[in-house]
Amino acid sequence: MRDSGATSNGRPALYTAAERVRRDSTRWTLVQGVLAPVQFLVFLVSLALVIRWFLTGEGLEIATISIVVKTLVLYLIMVTGSIWEKVVFGKWLFVPAFFWEDVFSMLVLALHTAYLAALYTGALDATQLMLLALAAYATYVINAGQFLLKLRAARLDMARADRQAGPVLHAEAAS
């Protein structure tokens, strides 16, 4: 049972007080905070290169390299994110607060991995590979949106908790 109460819309808060302390004290929070925008930047560059290839037929090799790099960064953020969940919540993946984000992350990971497998085996031609990459990227965008919504929810939860604690803190300071 979550001990941090429900939010104003009735959903449970993302973090208990103890989880918030662990979240704020672990280096893995900083690692995730750095890797997420790096991954997004790699994604944007790669997406531009893939679109360039579709429009001009040029740059297949650099587009392919960029997709591989994007996939490696995805693996890195998935591994470090799992470590973060273990430190903060005591479970490697699929904690209740991030269950659906983790489920969708598995689809993102599966599509990126399918791209690498198809590239390695030669199972798909260049157009098919690039379409698979775009499908993987579309799921990544949805998943990134899920996490941004959770980040916003966490900030709202924190602001609510601060408002609730405010009068108590002021009353204690006055006594």
Image (tube, rainbow, N blue to C red):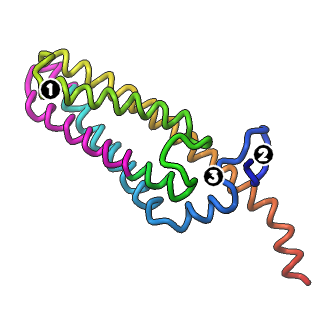
Q: Say which residue label 3 marks.
A: 155
Is residue 71 rendered magenta in the image? yes
Viewer-proximal residue among 65 and 19: 19
The residue at 79%/38% (across/down) is 10
Q: Earlier in the sequence, mark 3 or mark 2?
A: 2
Quarter holding the C terminus is: bottom right
Give the residue type at disc 3: Arg
Q: Secondary structure at mark 3?
A: helix
Task: Please tell me how crowded label 2 is: few (under 14), some (14-19), or many (20+) other residues with Cα within 10 Å.
Answer: few
Q: Quadrant of residue 34?
A: bottom left
Residue 72, given in percent of the width and then of the height, sits at 25, 43
What span is in magenta?
Answer: 51-79
Q: Say which residue label 1 marks.
A: 119
Q: Say which residue label 2 marks.
A: 6
**CB of mark 3 within 8 Å of CB of mark 2?**
no
Task: Please tell me how crowded label 3 is: few (under 14), some (14-19), or many (20+) other residues with Cα within 10 Å.
Answer: few
Give the residue type at disc 1: Leu
Q: In front of the other: label 3 or label 1? A: 1
Is residue 58 rendered magenta in the image? yes
Answer left or right for 89 relative to 103. right
Give the residue type at disc 2: Ala
Q: What is the CA distance from the residue labelled 3 to the residue labelled 2?
A: 14 Å
Residue 76, given in percent of the width and then of the height, sits at 31, 48
